[in-house]
Amino acid sequence: MGAGPVIALADLVFRWAAREQPCIDIARLEIGAGERVFLHGPSGSGKSTLLGLLGGVLAPERGSIRFLDAELTRLGARQRDRFRADHIGFIFQQFNLIPYLSVLENVLLPCRFSARRGELAATRGGTWRDEAARLLQHLDLEPGLQQRPAMHLSVGQQQRVAAARALIGQPEFVIADEPTSALDAERQQGFLALLLRESGDAGAALLYVSHDRRLAGAFDRELAMPALNRASELRQAA
Amino acid sequence: MHWLALAAKSAWNRRLTLGLTLAAVALSVALLLGIERVRRDARESFANSVSGTDLVVGARTSPVQLMLYAVFRIGEATNNIRWDAFRAVAGDPAVAWAIPLSLGDSHRGFPVLGTTSAYFEHFRYGDRRALEFCAGAPFRGVFDAVLGAEVAHRLGYHLGDRIILSHGIGGIGLPEHADKPFTVVGILAPTGTPVDRTVHVSLEAITAIHLDWQGGAPVPGFSIPPEYVRKFDLSPKEITAALIGLKSRAAVFRMQRRIDDYAGEPLLAVLPGVALDQLWEVVGTVERALLAVSAMVVVVGLAGLVAVILAGLNERRRELAILRSVGARPGGIFLLLTIDGLIVTVLGCVLGVLLLAALTAAARPFAQSHYGLAIHLQLLSLAELRLLAAVVLVGLLASLVPGYRAYRLSLADGLTPRL
């Protein structure tokens, strides 16, 4: 891994259709290994698009997305999918889980799609199941819930399962997109503390996207989307 | 990969809606196979009705019509042939045996056949099987009758029962030969052929019951009691048709030509196999139409399946985005949704086959006893397997539609579905 950044963006431009204004125009962004970054911005400031670019489901018009040793923009769609599976864990706002799979099966999904994360999970926990159980226990989920269908869980429980899924197999980078916005204030703090502890434990860099700046204090660094994305300034000026 | 397990779990989660479409597909498959099976069994039933007969001889008409009334007792002859003509044909050195057939009367809807003892000796059906008696023996006296298995079963007749024949075929209110009752002396074992539905009497009996009749009605004020009929000449004047067996099959075309060229009156000789082929050509159109309709029903079922999967797709966009986020390729999403439809199609085929098997097993005794239709409890025939393969193939093609739609959606949505 080395001491270099986990991810480095340079001169990144993306637009949805050729004639439209750019939606993303980022001069520079670097996130170091294990770094915890808080990113906030109003809706429409390009957060979702940025996540799509980082996750490799969108390809930029120009610029560079350097991820560890790989230049994402030079990879094909297939390789980017593989890269995402191997190195990034995602947590979304809500409805994070496949409803018809059990809690355990949901957590194990990345191991099934990525041989690398499967191996790492097995190395760390002994077996996939043990590692999933360990993560779920660390995230304060009762062992009895593991075999339950995901749809029977409360929202708070679902988010903790999603966190376990994002962290299994030690991805270098975890992206959390408004993971606490569906929780009440008390549970927000609790979830955030768990997530920070576990991502730190796993050595993963964390990009935490939220519109709620009250949470920013717990992070190493705070970024504002409008400041980062020149396109959103342009749009606001227009 | 694990797409199959994933699709199966997803399908189980939507088991109510998918279950209904599954039922529709299963029913349509059962219908399709059922029609194919009835078609085949009917053909087999027809083909089994006569075997070992080299030529069927009758008055000049169409070969199919001759077969229909002479062998299958369907319809009526427009013309008879004279007894002399039959004698001439039967006397030909190439002929091994000849069975005269005289039709036209009935008993409570079942056809009455006037014939000779040659019938019980030489008639063959199915795989060259001879007729067997399950009770009694062939007729000896003028007013003796031998019943087919179904006639006896349906009407509850036993040996020694007295029955009255009606003049003419089909319908109710036919004039009856009430003054000359017949005694049941024999009951044949079931054959699964029109024999089961036939009342057999001697040719002399046919003459006897019509002695005091003229133009299809009893002559008023003139009646001959049964005890006196023997005083009359009971040798037949006319018969309806005849079944001919030859000493050598090689002579069949020569004999056919000889009968067709018979100088006494216009006769027609047909090879049963050839006439059956002609019959299938006629019936084939209807069969194909039936198959086409049931195929359309299957298509409707599959269209419903695709509609249900497509309708549910919007609610699953979040699910697809989650799968993408853990590394699923758009191609995997395509596969997931295609397998979804394919699972239902294949399950529908399996259920349809089981349903048909259950229905067949349940209907078997009924069909055998009421229609003399021998339904086979067998594994899938080659033709049925071909139909099933076609259903699965169409199901697969149809399932590509939601697969492709999901593929496009997941490309457009990426990790954040725009709902």
Image: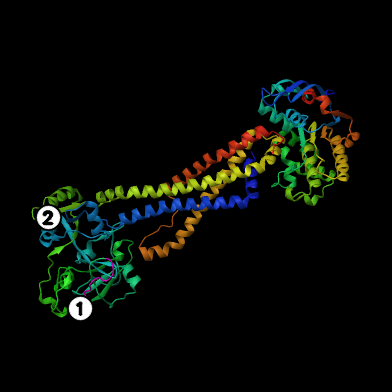
**Could you tell me the amino acid type at mark 2?**
Pro
Is B174 part of what is drawn in magenta? yes
Q: Nearer the viewer, residue B13 or B389?
A: B13
Numbered tag placed on residue B190 in the rendering: none
Residue A98 coordinates in the image, percent (x, y)? 71, 44
Q: Quadrant of the N terminus of chain B?
A: top right
Q: Badge 1: how crowded within 10 Å, few (<14), some, or many (20+)?
A: few
- Going by the numbered disc 1, the residue's amino acid type is Asp
Taking depth in this image into account, of B238 and B88 the one nearest to the observer is B238
**The furthest residue to the left:** B263
Q: Is residue B400 left or right of residue A122?
A: left
Q: How dense is the environment of label 2, judged by Cα within 10 Å: few (below 14), some, or many (20 and up)?
A: few
A1 shown above or below A170: above
Front residue (pair B163, B49): B163
**Percent position (x, y) of residue B152?**
32, 71
Magenta stretch containing residue B347, yes or no?
Answer: no
The location of residue B404, given as percent across then percent down, is: 58, 36
Q: Position of residue A45 (x, y in %)?
A: 78, 29
Q: Is residue B146 above or below residue A53?
A: below
Labels 1 and 2 in the same subunit: yes
Res A173 → quadrant: top right
Asked whether residue B125 is in view, the answer is yes
SS class of the residue under badge 1? loop
* Quadrant of residue B119 within the rendered picture: bottom left
Provide the residue span drawn in magenta. Answer: B170-180
Dot 1: chain letter: B
Mark closer to the chain start, 1 or 2: 2
Horizontal side, residue A148 vs residue B194: left or right:
right
Q: Which residue is mark 1?
A: B179
